[in-house]
Image (cartoon, rainbow, N blue to C red):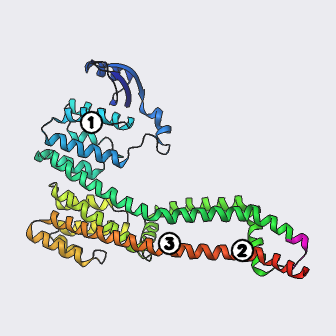
Amino acid sequence: MRLRYKAITQDNKIIRGLVDANDINEAALYLRSKNLVPITITQESQNNFLKNLPFFGKIKNSDLIVFTRQLSSMLSSGLTLIRSLEILKEQFGNETMLEITGSIMNDIEEGKNFSSAISKFPDIFSPIYVSIIKSAEGAGLLDKALLRLADNLEKQEKLKNTIKAALFYPAIVVTLMIVVVFIMMTFVIPQLANLYKGLNIELPFATKVIIFISGFFVVSWPLVIGLVILSIFLYRRWYKTEAGRLIVDDFKLKLPIFGNLIKKVILTELSRTLSVLVASGSLVVDSLVQTSETLGNVHYKNAVTDVAKRVENGVTIGDAMSYYTLFPPLLVQLVKIGEQTGKLDETLLKASEYFERETEQVVKLLTTALEPFIMVTLGLGVAFLMISVITPIYSLISAIK
């Protein structure tokens, strides 16, 4: 079992970490053998509830980037892996990262290699991360592999932040619009409906529609929320099936503007990940298979998997990719050039940079297109509500005159 410990070192420093042992006594003996005085030793499963809470004990991508880049720098300067990890451990403020670093150090001190030590934490170190480290260890190029991984992680994080920033404003506007509509339908419209009913006046069609929707929502809002939750649950169940993923992922790729954005993001990640794996010395077929597992769209995943099978049968990567319209001609040509020149990793890196620029252009277009669309939609909605509410009052005032 995996145990979480807190102990005192010989120089009276408090450290935390994780250790694998059959029980607490065995863990205590192990810590004492490392000249550590155990303070507390608990099962990791005791904190699972807290770990599942949002933002509690989670490792941010920025933490992993800092870990990877600083470790690369220290190894390049001539420090040993253990010493580098010790220095890193003193710098982290994230308790979970401290414990993970301590666990990695313990495994390395026991004779395990770095790739085996980090493979125990698949939620943090992805299979591709571990694979690249494993290949680099055999070639003695761990510092260079870590540098490539740090660059790759930073580019991935930059791309995600660009997309999030573009969608942040529309998301805020839509959320506020939903809140306003909820308040109007739940509190404002029912009061006006009672007023109009007491005045005994003929209501316009638009007002009748708004009052009907409001009345239905006030009475049946638990049913509406229940149906929404049930629909989300059923959709997720269905999406996990092969047929569901094929239909939904195909629909996503065909969406106006958004579909093009999804394609560009996938092609960027595909090119960059495959470039890093090939540069690390991994076999091309293995690199393709591992890359396919990182793609969020089942159609691209199946296509890359099939490309790997064709390559295994003797077909070149470029020729295998040309069978699928999912891969644009530019990517196919760059892959063919890379295979002919023996610089596949470099041409794939250039392809990823090209698709990244294309992604940024699509994001700008999306932002430009969404803002006026949202404003027009919001304006029409507000106008409809205002006309529905004010028209009866105006009619009443006119009748009195």
Q: Magenta span covers which residues? A: 196-201
Q: Nearer the viewer, residue 159 or 382?
A: 382
Q: Indicate the quadrant where residue 35 lies.
A: top left
Q: Which residue is mark 2?
A: 386
Q: Position of residue 293 (x, y in %)?
A: 32, 59
Q: Position of residue 11 (x, y in %)?
A: 27, 18
Task: State which mark lies toward you, 3 or 1.
Answer: 3
Q: Which residue is mark 1?
A: 88
Q: Nearer the viewer, residue 357 or 329?
A: 357
Q: Residues within 10 Å of mark 1 (few under 14, many from 20)?
A: some
Tag 1: amino acid:
Leu
Instruction: Work out whether residue 149 can be spotted.
Output: yes
Dot 2 lies on which element?
helix
Q: Which mark is residue 371?
A: 3
Q: Is residue 307 magenta?
A: no
Could you tell which of marks 3 and 1 lies nearer the N-terminus? 1
Dot 1 lies on which element?
helix
Position above or below: 206 against 285: below
Could you tell which of marks 1 and 2 lies nearer the N-terminus? 1
CA separation in Å, label 3 and label 2: 22 Å
Task: State which mark lies toward you, 1 or 2.
Answer: 2
**Residue in the picture at 85% in, 71% down:** 196
Q: Position of residue 328 (x, y in %)?
A: 27, 76
CA separation in Å, label 1 and label 2: 60 Å
Instruction: Work out whether residue 315 can be spotted.
Output: no
